[in-house]
């Protein structure tokens, strides 16, 4: 069974601060996605990382895939109140393109104005 | 922007009743999925569907569950005899072969009384 553990589970910081969220597993994934979920809504895709060591940037968000493709991190620079939400990582297995996603436990982020 | 649409947004039913949740995936997508999220818990994989048949299902997806794509457009999840523990948010998702990324609908909240 593939498991993805996210840390921290909850994070509350002041506007303007930087933060990093981690997503760890003992399993290797063919790709890893980061989603953001608002209350009562479905997860919204932020980014996909595929190659070990890959780094992708989305404005103030930086995503990195671990060299061994077992873990990932999300770094937010100068956090804004609009960044508040539930951040989920999800890993796809080896049958690329037709594989279920295993979701992480989630990090609930609150940015205090 | 294309999106996955789900109906109903909320359904309340009595235990033992049949429920059908409907989804219209993004039109050029080939892979279709149902996930569920019990309140406060992780998003969990239920079933994947490709080429008009189930490609993978989880332990949750027992004989009470079924999926079909009757008209090449809608993708439905049927629960034959609902149980209290089926109460959850059910998310439909679709994807292509190229990236493994999934696009989720806004979900159908099922409440079983």
Image (tube, rainbow, N blue to C red):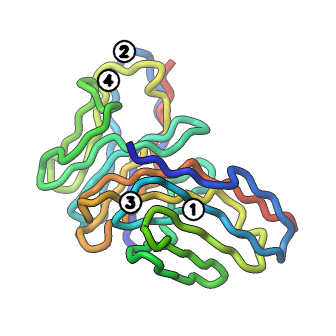
| Badge 2: residue crowd in 10 Å (few <14, some 14–19, many ≥20) | some
Label 4 or label 3, whichever lies nearer to me, is: 3
Quadrant of the image occupied by residue B36: top left
Q: Are marks 1 and 4 on the same chain?
A: no
Q: How far apart are marks 2 and 4 (CA)?
A: 7 Å
Residue neighbourhood size for the residue with mark 1, other residues' Cα within 10 Å, grouped as few (<14), some (14–19), many (≥20):
many
Q: In this view, does A85 lie to the left or right of B21?
A: right
Residue annotated with mark 1: A36
Residue A78 horizontal side relative to residue B110, left or right = right
The residue positioned 46% from the left and 80% from the top of the image is: A54
Kind of element beneath mark 4: loop
Chain that bears disc 3 = A
Secondary structure state at the residue bearing disc 1 = strand
Marking on residue A28: 3
Q: Do the residues labelled 1 and 4 touch (CB within 8 Å)?
A: no
Spatial separation of the CA atoms under disc 1 and disc 3: 22 Å
Seen in the picture, residue A23 relative to A55 is either above or below; the reply is: above
Mark whose residue sits in front, 1 or 3 = 3
The residue pinned by badge 2 equals B16
Q: Are marks 3 and 2 in contact (CB under 8 Å)?
A: no
State the image coordinates of residue B7 (x, y, percent, origin top left).
39, 45
- Residue drawn at (21%, 56%) of the image: B73
Secondary structure under tag 3 reads loop
Q: Which residue is drawn at 38% across and 42% down?
A: A1
* Residue that mark 4 sits on: B18
Separation (CA) of disc 1 from disc 2? 34 Å
Residue drawn at (35%, 39%) of the image: B21
């Amino acid at each position: 069974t593939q498991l993805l553990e996210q840390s921290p589970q909850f994070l509350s910081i002041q506007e303007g601060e930087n933060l990093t969220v981690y997503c760890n597993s003992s399993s290797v994934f063919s790709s890893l996605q980061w989603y953001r979920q608002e209350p009562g809504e479905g997860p919204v895709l932020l980014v996909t990382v595929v190659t070990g060591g890959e780094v992708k940037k989305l404005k103030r968000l930086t995503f990195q895939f671990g060299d061994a493709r077992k873990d990932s991190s999300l770094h937010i620079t100068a956090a804004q109140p609009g960044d508040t939400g539930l951040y989920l990582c999800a890993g796809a297995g080896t049958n690329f393109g037709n594989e279920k996603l295993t979701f992480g436990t989630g990090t609930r982020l609150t940015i205090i104005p | 922007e294309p999106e996955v649409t789900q109906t109903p947004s909320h359904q309340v039913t009595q235990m033992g009743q049949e429920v059908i949740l409907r989804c219209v995936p993004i039109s050029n997508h080939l892979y279709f999925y149902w996930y569920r999220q019990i309140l406060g818990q992780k998003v969990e994989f239920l079933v994947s569907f490709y080429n008009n048949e189930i490609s993978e299902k989880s332990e949750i997806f027992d004989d009470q569950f079924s999926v079909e794509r009757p008209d090449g457009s809608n993708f439905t999840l049927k629960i034959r005899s609902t149980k209290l523990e089926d109460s959850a948010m059910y998310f439909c998702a679709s994807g292509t072969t190229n990236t493994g990324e999934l696009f989720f609908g806004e979900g159908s909240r099922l409440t079983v009384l």
